[in-house]
Each structure stands twice: as structure tokens, then as C-alpha cells.
Amino acid sequence: MISVRNLQKKIGRQEILRGVDLEVNEGQTAVIVGRSGGGKSVLLKHIIGLMKPTSGDVLVDKESIIHLSERQLAVIRRKVGILFQSGALFDSMTVEENLAFPLREAGERDPNVLRQKISEALEVVDLQGQEKKMPESLSGGMKKRVGLARAIISNPASILYDEPTSGLDPVVADSINHLIRRMQNRFQVTSVVVTHDMKTAFHVGDQIAYLHEGRIYFHGSPSDFRSSPDPLIQDFILGRSRGTD
Amino acid sequence: MLIRFIGRSVLSFLRYLGELVLLAADTVQSIFTAPIRWRLCFSQVLEVGFRSQLVVIMTGAFTGAVFAAQTFFQFHSLGMDSAVGSVVAVSMFRELGPVLTGLMVAGRVGAAMSAEIGTMKVTEQIDALRALGVYPVDYLVVPRTLAMMVSMPLLVAECVGVGIVAGYVVGVGLLDIPAVYYVHYMQKFTGLRDIKMALSKGFVFAFLIVFISCHQGLNAKEGAVGVGRAPTEAVVIGSLAILVSNFFLSLLLNVVFPYGG
């Protein structure tokens, strides 16, 4: 379970988050939507302790993480997988080494176990046979899928997705959406997805939180979000700007 | 206006020093408390030590050679040809060997370290390390620090050795200084204290280079300009730190390992 309480973040003079409250129950998928530069990725980074808030609290499995040191956070982070916007693969390692990395760090040394788990993770993301490739020879979509395989290989209880479909063509984006759904059905993980892609939001979300001007403006089911009469929400769903030609 | 500018510069310099000290303290703590990744350490020794040899050998050889020649030109008129060997050896040990090796390694290795870590920072690879439960100092800074601690004293020794041999070749081979006197005076005026001084300086410069370079990489700003600036600043700050600290180290080490003592 992930709980965010009155989270505020100031960077310099800019207030990025102005008191965000969010609860994600076990096995649920929360989608955080909002305009670009609205603080969605910042919120996600707070959930895994990559950023420290100005005030407020973040609880993972009922444990507050904001006062933990980097070394103490390592224990929490092993329970949470994260897919970065760019994939964030280690570019000095092959796909296989990238996937083996979290397992080796957790103490796994048996080459047969490593091979087995890598093969299973690549199968989940439909990338069998790509073990020996270097990240620079992969397409954007493949990088994201390898990033996802790395995030799930240690069987985390929660997965965080940072813009999983941004920069991908509609077909690859759709395959990533299906993949996220498959993760939920297969592993029952708690997920938080940050996106501004409404197709992704409606496809994978059990609940949608709309982040606007540093606060959660709307929090509810995808159907309530879609049918909301609020012009701000409708403009966002339909991608409508208020500018004139 | 001027006072405010000076105040701001002093404060930012002090903050920078504080950050370096914190990184150093964090690294030392990691060395003693976290598991050491020996495979990464060996690959860094290969990168830092083994692959720096050519540049260090070239530097040592031509510095020793030109220093022997210049010393001979000055001493010849005074009839002190045989003192050339001792001057070259003592200078190489106490100043030229450690400083020139430090500068060359700061340029070659420091730039590479800060560029690599800086690129990892802006491509979210360092965030990925943290997200996977790995503390970046343990994974990136500790192996580089240990590799530098091993490699720098050896590179300094190599530079000094090659410089002395090159000085001998020029002095005895080209300038006709009698070999027996050259070696005799070199041995007479060079002692264990000089070797200790060279290695101590190499050791200190290793720390300066690794912490300055890793700090620049870990604090690289977003974008091509940010990543490009990290190695440039690492080399400039690293080189200046070596030159400035060398002066104070010479004064200090001269007390610890006094010449003629």
C-alpha cells in the first residue's frame, strides 16, 4: 500500500507540489495524469524516496520513508520496481547484465537461476533472444520493455511507471499498455502510473488522480473522470487548448 | 556590490569544499561498512592505472631528459657536471614526478570519470541505481577511489623512474658526463625520504582527483552543456588543486621527511 499525505515540494522559489494526498491500495493501479511539467514525475520520485519533500509524508507499506537515509531506503526500494521515462538502462551493460543486476545485488550468484529468471522476465515483455544486445542498439519501445523487465525481475510488491508510453508510436504504446495490464493480472502488484496519455490512463487505471497546479484536482474512477462535467478535466481529456487561431 | 560578489564567491567556495568533504567522508564510510565490488575495482585499476601508463611514461621520459639537459647547461660553466644526476633525481622524486603525473592523470582519468558519471546522472542511470537499492557512492565512487589509491603511487613511481633513466641517457650518453660520478652523486643525495615524499604526494593527489571528478559528475546539470561542463571543470579544478596543494604538501612533507635528514 502506498500513501502520500499533504506532500509539498519547493525547488528554489517554485512550488511544484502544494499538498498532495493520495492512497493506493494493495493490488490497485492509480494513474496520475496532468499537464507536462505539472509535477507528476516529481511526485513519483517522492514515492520511492528519490526526492525529499519540503513537508508532508510518504508511507510505503505503512512505513514512513521520508526520514530514512539512502542506505535504509535501499531495503524499501527493493520492494518497489520503477520504470523510468527513458528506460534508464545501464549503457555499459548488455540487456542480460541489466536484468541480472538487481538479482546479483540481492545476492543471487547461481548462473542457472539468473539465466532462468532473465529468460522469464524477457518472455513477459516479449523480448526473448535479445539478451546479448547493448542498450544503444535497441529501439525506444524495446528499451522501455527491458526497463520494465528489470523492474519486475525481483518480484516487487509495487511498480511505478514514469510516462510509460511517451515518445512511442501508437502501436508500441498500445503494447506497453497491454503489458502493464498483464503485470497487474499476473502478479497482482500495486501500481502507480504517471502519464499524460489518456488512452493509457483509461486502459490501465483502477483510479485516476488529476494533478493540477501542484494539487490533486480530481480523484476517482476512470468512468467518473471521463464523465466529469468540469471544463478543465474535459479540456484535458480531449486535448483542447483555450487558444484562438 | 563588490563586497557582495566577494562574499558570494567565498560562500560558494566554502559550500563546494563542504560538499567535497562530505563525499570523501561518505566514501570512507562506504569502504569500511559496505561490501566492496572487487570486479569493478579491478576494471578501474585497468582503466586508471594500466591505460595511463603511456602518457605517464612519455611525460616522465621527456621531463627527465630536458631537465638533465638544462641542468647540465647551467652547471657545466661552474664545473659541476657530475651534480646533474642528483639534481634530476631529487627534483623528479620530490616535485616533478608527482605533480606531472597528477596533472596527466587529472586530464586523462578525471575527465573520463566525471563525463561517465555525469552522463549516467542525466540519463537517470544514477536514479536507476538508487531505485534498485544500490547506493551510488558504493557503486561508483568507492571502486574509483580504491583504484586511484593503488594506481597513483605506482604511476608516480613509474614516472620518476623513467625520468631518472631518461636523465641518465641524456647526461651520460649525449652530454658526456662520467657515468660513475653521475650515479655516485645521484645515490649520495637521493634517499628513502625522497621516495616516501613522492609516494605520499601521489596518494594525496589520487584523493583530490577522484573526489573532484566524481563530485563534478554526480552534480552534472541537465543537457549537453551540463555534461560537457563536468569534465572541463573536473580537469581545471583538479589541476589547480594539485598545484596549490603541492606547495603546502612540500612544506609539510619537508618537515616529515626533511632533506638531508
Image: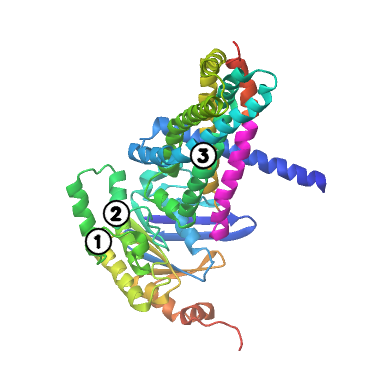
Q: Is residue A30 above or below residue A45?
A: below
Other residues around mark 1 within 10 Å, as few (<14) / some (14–19) / many (≥20): many
Check the residue under mark 3 and report the chain it is in.
Answer: B
State the residue at coordinates (30%, 57%).
A95
Q: Is residue A174 magenta?
A: no
Q: Residue at x 31, y 67 (%)?
A: A180
Disc 1 designates what residue?
A: A122
Q: Which residue is mark 2?
A: A99
From this view, report whether residue B85 is shown above or below residue A133: above
Label 1 marks a residue whose chain is A
Could you tell me if the residues under marks 2 and 1 are in contact, i.e. CB atoms within 8 Å? yes
Disc 3 versus disc 2: nearer the observer: 3
Q: Which residues are magenta?
A: B221-245
Magenta span: chief secondary structure: helix
SS for callout 3: helix
Residue B211 visible in the picture: no
For this rendering, which residue is in front, B35 or A3? Answer: B35
Res A100 label: none
In screen coordinates, is A110 left or right of A29? left
Q: Along the horizontal axis of the image, is B50 left or right of A211?
A: left
| Pointer 3 residue | B105
- Kind of residue at badge 3: Val
Query: What is the spatial separation of the Cα atoms under label 2 and label 1, in whole angstroms?
Result: 9 Å
Residue type at mark 1: give it.
Leu
- Please name the residue shown 56% across and 26% down the image: B171
Q: Position of residue A105 (x, y in %)?
A: 31, 44
